[in-house]
Each structure stands twice: as C-alpha cells, then as structure tokens.
Image: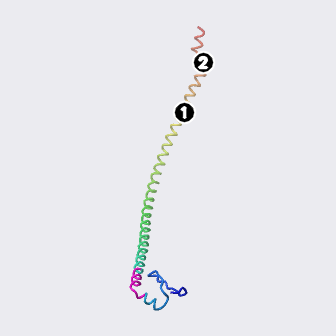
Amino acid sequence: MSDKQQMYWCKFCKKFIQNKAVTRQQHESSGSHKRCMQKFLEEEKRAEARKDKREFDLLNDISKMEQAAVKQMGQDIEHNAIREKVITKDTGIRESLNDIRKKREDSKKQERAARSYYFETIRQTPDYTTSSARDY
C-alpha cells in the first residue's frame, strides 16, 4: 500500500480500505461488511425508537402537567371563593369586636373620669376631722 493512494472510509465497518473499485466491491460483498451494516442499521432503528419514546414521554409529561395545573387552578379558584366568603364573615366579626372594644374603652374612660372627679371633690372639701381634733 502506498502513501499517495487515497483510502476509502467504510462507516459501517469503521475502517479504511483501498479506494479501488475492485477492492471496494470485494469489501462490500464480504460477510463482515454485511454484518457491520446490519448492526449499524439496527442501532439506527434503536436510536430512532429511543428518540420517539423520549418525545412521547415528554409530551405525556407535559399533558399531565397541564391537567394538574388546570385541576390546581380550579381548586385555587374554589379556595379563593371560600376565602372571600370567610373574609367577609371575618370582617363582620371584626367590626363587631371593634365595636365591643370601643364600648369597653368608652366605659373605662367614663369610669376614670368619674373617679378623677370624685377624688378632685374630696381634695377640695375641707378636712373637718383633723382640724377639729386639734382644737380640743
């Protein structure tokens, strides 16, 4: 084999052969080439099947995610509707509690005002018991 001669690469067998018509024909008619070509084609089919399965699984997963999202969205809408009902009831309860708190605060203020008035009147009245005791 000379270095100047071009070589042919057989992609099925993964090796170089002489680039002569007779040599190529002999190689392509050999049993090893036919077995390698059969393996190559089977591997191509398997790769295509794996690719198709991956695509199918991906589409199936996307479909499941979409269904779960629709279901969750329905639950969220239902939950928010219930939540709004609870909030409106809750605001009614809060308003009544705030009214009760205001009434308590008002009554405490009135009680404080009454106490302070009582103590102011006691301070302003003369203390007769101490002064009369000194006189005797």
Q: Position of residue 99 (x, y in %)?
A: 50, 42
| Amino acid type for the residue under numbered disc 1 | Gln
Q: Position of residue 18 (x, y in %)?
A: 49, 87
- Residue 97 sits above or below residue 42 on the image: above
Q: Marks 1 and 2, Cα distance to the nearest angstrom?
A: 26 Å
Q: Position of residue 87 (x, y in %)?
A: 47, 51
Name the mark on residue 126: 2
Please report the bounds of the magenta region as a residue range. 28-39
Magenta stretch contains residue 45 = no
> Under tag 2, what secondary structure?
loop
| Amino acid type for the residue under numbered disc 2 | Pro
The residue depicted at 49 percent of the width and 85 percent of the height is: 8
Most foreground residue, 41 or 11: 11
Residue 34 falls in image quadrant: bottom left
Most foreground residue, 74 or 114: 74
Q: Quadrant of the C terminus?
A: top right
Residue 79 falls in image quadrant: bottom left
Name the mark on residue 110: 1
Magenta stretch, main secondary structure, is: helix
Q: Are marks 1 and 2 in contact (CB under 8 Å)?
A: no
Image check: 133 left or right of 48? right
The residue depicted at 53 percent of the width and 37 percent of the height is: 105
> Under tag 1, what secondary structure?
helix
